[in-house]
Image (spheres, rainbow, N blue to C red):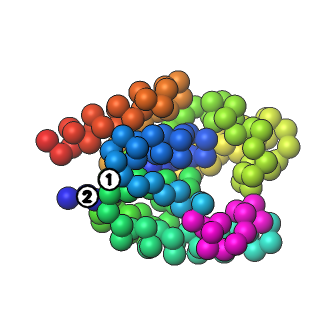
């Protein structure tokens, strides 16, 4: 039986916000792997990217994935590119139900456009950022589709998503 719930998906799809609400509803703990990377490294993710590059960030990410995969009764929010790494995907899927959040590119843009702490989107113009979001979504879709199920978060409230996840879990378990 799966002991954790992993929330995956592109930045701005609601993983951390919904994850905290879901953990509260289930009486479980909540962990955001990006926050854990910042604690471990002592640096903001943007600084890791700018000073050391994406490869170093991904190494931190894999280390954190190993650590959190040993836990039980946690909702774990992982970064948007975490499941692209087959090692991360395998480690997490051993004892976690993996749910991927999706949203329309324009919705993602509206949610993240004011946040300068998104290193993969520091491109300047709206058109370039939207194009990059679409490009990354397309590139990651084959990995996202390997999840246990996918939820579109585009126009749903937090409580609706929590209810939908609980319904899906019930359907899988029973």
Residue 173 vertical position relative to residue 53 in the rendered view, above or below: above
Q: Is 43 a magenta residue?
A: yes
Q: Which residue is mark 1?
A: 97
> Where are the magenta residues, as a range?
36-47
Task: State the image coordinates of residue 147 (x, y, percent, origin top left).
Answer: 37, 50
Residue appearing at x 49%, y 26% in the figure? 157
Q: Is residue 151 above or below residue 9?
A: above
Q: Residue furthest right?
A: 124
Residue 112's x, y, as percent? Answer: 70, 40
Camera-side residue: 168 or 86?
A: 168
Residues at marks 1 and 2 touching, judged by CB atoms closer than 8 Å: yes
In the rendered view, would you say 43 is above or below 79?
below
Is residue 51 in view from this perspective?
A: yes
Q: Magenta-highlighted stretch: main secondary structure?
A: helix
Could you tell me how far apart the alpha carbons at marks 1 and 2 are, in whole angstroms? Answer: 6 Å
**Relative to residue 169, is residue 30 depicted above or below?**
below
173 drawn magenta = no
- Can you identify the residue that label 2 sits on? 2
Near-viewer residue (28 or 11): 28
Residue 41 location, x and y as percent?
66, 74
| Quadrant containing the N terminus in the rendered view | bottom left
Is residue 78 visible from the viewing direction of this image? no
Q: Is residue 128 left or right of residue 132?
A: right
Q: Residues within 10 Å of mark 1 (few under 14, many from 20)?
A: many
- Residue under the image location 79 percent in, 48 percent down: 116
Point 75% across, 74% down: residue: 52
Q: Identify the element where label 1 is drawn.
A: strand
């Amino acid at each position: 039986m799966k002991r954790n719930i992993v929330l995956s998906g592109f930045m701005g799809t609601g993983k951390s916000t919904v994850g905290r609400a879901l953990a509260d509803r289930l009486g479980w703990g909540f962990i955001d792997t990006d926050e854990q990377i910042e604690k471990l490294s002592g640096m903001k993710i943007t600084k890791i990217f700018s000073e050391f590059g994406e490869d170093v960030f991904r190494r931190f990410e894999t280390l954190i994935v190993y650590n959190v995969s040993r836990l039980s009764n946690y909702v774990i929010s992982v970064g948007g590119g975490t499941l692209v790494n087959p090692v991360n995907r395998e480690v997490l899927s051993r004892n976690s139900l993996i749910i991927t959040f999706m949203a329309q590119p324009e919705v993602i843009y509206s949610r993240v456009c004011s946040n300068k702490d998104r290193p993969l989107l520091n491109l300047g113009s709206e058109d370039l950022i939207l194009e990059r979001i679409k490009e990354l979504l397309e590139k990651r879709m084959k990995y996202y589709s390997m999840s246990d199920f996918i939820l579109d978060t585009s126009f749903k409230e937090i409580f609706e998503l929590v209810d939908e996840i609980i319904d899906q879990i019930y359907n899988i378990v029973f």
